[in-house]
Amino acid sequence: MKQLKLLIAFIIIAHCGYCQTKTTKTPSKTSTTSKSSSNFKGWRDLTWGNTEATVKQKYGSQLTILPSPGKYGANQEWYCPFEIHNYDLGYDTFNVSFLFDAKTKKLVQVNVKKEDPVNIRETIQYLELSLTEKYGKPIFKEETPKYISKWSFPELSIELTYSDMKVGDVQISKTIFLVYRKPEKAKLDNF
């Protein structure tokens, strides 16, 4: 009788563990939405290939010019000359970084980042809901071991992730990342 109770307890615990680590993947090739996916070509009113001058013209009063451009990419192929600090996304404020290709000097990626959000899970849920309302269901979503949701269109790839790192009871880092970029053709074909 005692062994039967232990077996039932083990099955219940195993099932709970499975439910908490479940990963959801949507098999569709692109996100679906009522809006035409051809409208999604960049971040807000910017499109890939815009110049620094275009970004300054559209967001000039909000931009903070960096003392020296930030370098990004494995080979530092991108640079960030300016950012928007405290950009209001309705639920919280974020920092927005504009990344340009070092060779062409054209916009290739926009990073939207929030460090130390008050409630990381609520903020992620709000962002995912807002993105889903605008772009449709994500084509990929994983909640463990880390959170990631992706949307993909012919001219736009969006990735929402967060990092919540702790060592024991000590919080090391708590950051939300929302990345907009033009998808690489080879990667888009893999979806």
Image (tube, helix red, strand yellow):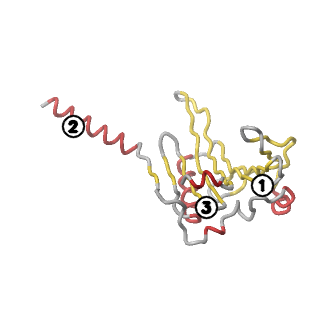
Residue type for callout 3:
Phe
Residue nearer the viewer, 95 or 143: 143
Q: Nearer the viewer, mark 2 or mark 3?
A: 3
Q: Residue at x 72, y 38 (%)?
A: 74
Label 2 vs 3, first from the N-terminus: 2
Q: Position of residue 136 (x, y in %)?
A: 54, 64
Apparent side of residue 170 relative to residue 7 in the rendered image (left or right): right
Residue under label 3, please give it.
153
Q: Which mark is residue 8?
A: 2
**Quadrant containing the C terminus in the rendered view:** bottom right
Q: Position of residue 155 (x, y in %)?
A: 66, 61
How crowded is the residue under tag 3: few (<14 C-alpha within 10 Å), some, or many (20+)?
many
Apparent side of residue 32 relative to residue 65 in the rendered image (left or right): left
How crowded is the residue under tag 2: few (<14 C-alpha within 10 Å), some, or many (20+)?
few
Apparent side of residue 77 relative to residue 122 in the rendered image (left or right): right
- Dividing the picture into quarters, in which one does residue 87 lie? bottom right
Q: Residue at x 55, y 56 (%)?
A: 128
How crowded is the residue under tag 1: few (<14 C-alpha within 10 Å), some, or many (20+)?
many
Residue type for callout 2:
Ile
Q: Position of residue 24 (x, y in %)?
A: 44, 51
Secondary structure of residue under mark 2: helix
Q: CA distance from mark 2 to mark 1?
A: 57 Å
Residue under label 1, please give it.
107
Residue nearer the viewer, 50 or 119: 50
Q: CA distance from mark 1 to mark 3?
A: 17 Å
Secondary structure of residue under mark 3: strand
Label 1 vs 3, first from the N-terminus: 1
Label 2 vs 1, first from the N-terminus: 2
Q: Residue at x 53, y 48 (%)?
A: 121
- Dividing the picture into quarters, in which one does residue 133 lie? bottom right
Secondary structure of residue under mark 1: strand
Image mark count: 3
